[in-house]
Image: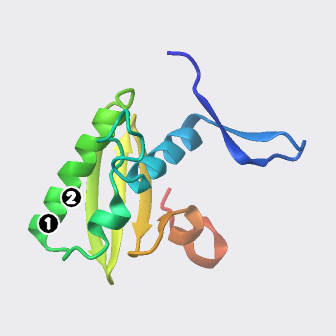
Amino acid sequence: MSKQVDMLMSVDEFNTPKIVTNLSLINLKMVRLMLMEPGTFPDQPDRGFGLVSRYRYMQYTDGNLIELQQALKQHIETWMPYLEGVDVVLEVKNKVLNIGISANEVFYEYTYDGKSLKNVTLDDVGGDNGASGILI
């Protein structure tokens, strides 16, 4: 498999288009896939999970979460076939949907509050002093 890259609409410190590779690229593609509405690309009408429009007002019951979890996993496996060992875990806390996706032995974590999808960072986990919440 050749090295995959993507360019953003922003520039780096050398005033050239910012390039995303490796784990950042997979993360970017997952976010795009979750937020993309089905039908965005006419030649691939099923591409796009539509998290905002399809699940914003969803009642987060155990049955609905399992259905959402399976649908997201299937969508990732379909549109990102180069990822291996895809698993999706969903959990709702304080009306915020926590999304955990493992693929290629890496864990990607997001929160969705009905308005925006955000990456969970080490600062989010560790509080004020960075990685204090991480056990080594």
Relative depth, front residue between 40 and 69: 40
Residue 2 point in image, percent of width and height: 55, 16
Relative depth, front residue between 81 and 133: 81
Q: Name the residue carrying label 1.
A: 64
Q: Are marks 2 and 1 in contact (CB under 8 Å)?
A: yes
Q: Quadrant of residue 112?
A: bottom left
The residue furthest top is: 1
Q: Residues within 10 Å of mark 2 (few under 14, many from 20)?
A: many
Q: Identify which residue is drawn at 42% across, 56% down.
A: 35
Q: Name the residue carrying label 2.
A: 68
Q: Identify which residue is drawn at 33% across, 70% down.
A: 97
Q: Amino acid at mark 1?
A: Asn
Instruction: Name the disc covering residue 89, or none.
Output: none
The residue furthest bottom is: 94
Q: Quadrant of residue 53?
A: bottom left
Q: Identify which residue is drawn at 57% across, 76% down.
A: 127
